[in-house]
Image (cartoon, rainbow, N blue to C red):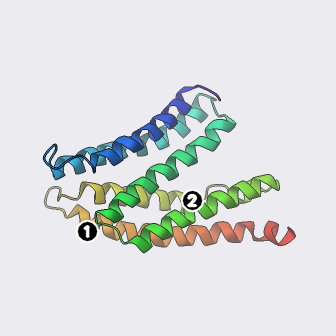
């Protein structure tokens, strides 16, 4: 395992997950629900920023590693899954939407692993639609976690709309990756 700044940031993202979850299970009265939402949003925002930052630093500092390439998407999927499960439990996201997003992440992760094993990993490299999906998903989760209006803007409703956009882009990107892998799948 390589210890460098990008990998440390990735590990930090994984360590934030239990802290994020514990906030929602503190006994009533310890912290107000609005404070829980604020701190959970802050933790998720830090995780989202480190997701971008660890990849940027790995490339900029020439500190890419096979371990980092493995751990980064795992950390991302764990954080997003934890947030979606919490949002479903709070009644802020419908379970089918969460299942679409989580199911796609598992499917595409497995597809990428299999494609790498057969020497075709470039055909399922991250695409533009995948990046747009991730951006919509992260913004939706942040808005749904925070919940309270900001400057009179109903962020919960905006987050819900973005979550449906993210679910649509999730299905679209899964179709894109499956089509990209189709030729190699037929050969096997």
- Percent across and percent down for residue 99 are 48, 69
- Percent across and percent down for residue 150 are 17, 56
- Percent across and percent down for residue 3 are 59, 25
The quarter of the picture where the N terminus appears is: top right
Of residues 63 and 110, the one nearer the viewer is 110
Up the image or down, 10 lies above or below 158; here it is above
Asked if residue 143 lies left or right of residue 56, the reply is: left
Q: Which residue appears farthest toward the right when viewing the image?
A: 187
At horizontal 85% and vertical 67% (from top left) the residue drawn is 188
- Percent across and percent down for residue 70 are 64, 43
| Residue on which the image places disc 1 | 157
Residue 61, picture quadrant:
top right
Badge 2: residue crowd in 10 Å (few <14, some 14–19, many ≥20): few
At horizontal 61% and vertical 59% (from top left) the residue drawn is 127
| Residue on which the image places disc 2 | 128
Of residues 180 and 65, the one nearer the viewer is 65
Estimate the spatial distance between the alpha carbons at disc 2 and disc 1, rounded to whole Å. 26 Å
Asked if residue 75 lies left or right of residue 138, the reply is: right
Asked if residue 32 lies left or right of residue 61, the reply is: left
Q: Which residue appears farthest toward the front when viewing the image?
A: 27
Q: Secondary structure at mark 2?
A: helix
At horizontal 39% and vertical 43% (from top left) the residue drawn is 18
The disc at residue 58 is none
Q: Secondary structure at mark 1?
A: helix
Up the image or down, 38 lies above or below 128; here it is above
């Amino acid at each position: 395992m390589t210890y460098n700044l990008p990998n440390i940031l990735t590990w930090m993202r994984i360590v934030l997950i239990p802290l994020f979850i514990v906030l929602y299970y503190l006994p009533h009265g310890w912290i107000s629900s609005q404070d829980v939402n604020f701190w959970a949003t802050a933790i998720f925002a830090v995780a989202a920023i480190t997701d971008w930052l660890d990849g940027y630093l790995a490339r900029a500092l020439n500190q890419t590693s096979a371990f980092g390439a493995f751990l980064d998407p795992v950390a991302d999927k764990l954080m997003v899954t934890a947030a979606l499960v919490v949002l479903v439990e709070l009644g802020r996201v419908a379970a089918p939407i969460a299942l679409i997003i989580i199911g796609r992440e598992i499917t595409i992760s497995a597809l990428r692993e299999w494609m790498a094993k057969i020497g075709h990993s470039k055909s399922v490299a991250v695409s533009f639609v995948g990046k747009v999906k991730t951006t919509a998903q992260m913004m939706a989760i942040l808005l749904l976690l925070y919940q309270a209006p900001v400057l009179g803007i109903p962020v919960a409703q905006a987050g819900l709309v973005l979550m449906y956009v993210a679910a649509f882009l999730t299905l679209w990107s899964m179709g894109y990756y499956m089509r990209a892998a189709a030729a190699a799948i037929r050969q096997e």
